[in-house]
Image (cartoon, rainbow, N blue to C red):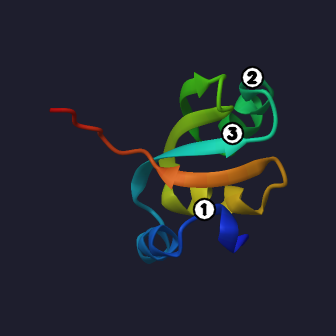
Amino acid sequence: MAKSRIAARLARKWRASPQTQVHAIVRIVAEPEDVVSVLEQRGLKVVHLYRLLPAVAISGLAQDILSLADEDWVTSIEEDTQVHTM
């Protein structure tokens, strides 16, 4: 797994519970539309396409999302969490 593509803390958390449903934002080097079918074939649900980044918001099993770190078209993976404003 490419260590620089996912924070070590997050990788440990997801490896400890590989069958857990999680949400992630995956930054990519391709157009978001170009990776949708690949993600869906891996059993991942595409929740949103970000075109300015480019990135995709996805959900699926932690182990399946972790496996994306080995892909050349993935630049980073982070947990998709709620953001609160004051």
Q: Which residue is mark 1?
A: 66
Judge from the rendering whether residue 32 lies leftward or rightward of residue 58; answer left or right: right
Kindly report the distance in space between the C-alpha atoms of the residues bearing marks 2 and 3.
10 Å
Taking the spot 53% from the left edge, 75% from the top edge, the residue there is 8
* Front one among 33 and 16: 33
Question: In which quadrant is the N terminus drawn?
Answer: bottom right
Give the x, y percent position of residue 70.
Answer: 77, 63
Report the amino acid beneath label 1: Leu
Q: Is residue 40 left or right of residue 70?
A: left
Q: Quadrant of residue 29?
A: top right
* In the rendered image, the vertical position of residue 46 relative to residue 5, given as above or below: above
Q: Which mark is residue 39?
A: 3
Which amino acid, by three-letter code, is at mark 2? Glu
Of the pair 15 and 52, the residue shown nearer to us: 52
> How far is mark 1 from mark 3, CA to CA?
12 Å
Q: Helix or strand or loop: what does disc 3 sit on?
A: helix
Looking at the image, tell me whether mark 2 or mark 3 is earlier in sequence order. 2
Q: Which mark is residue 33?
A: 2
Tell me if 38 is positioned left or right of 84 in this view.
right
CB contact under 8 Å: marks 1 and 2:
no
Amino acid at dot 3:
Leu
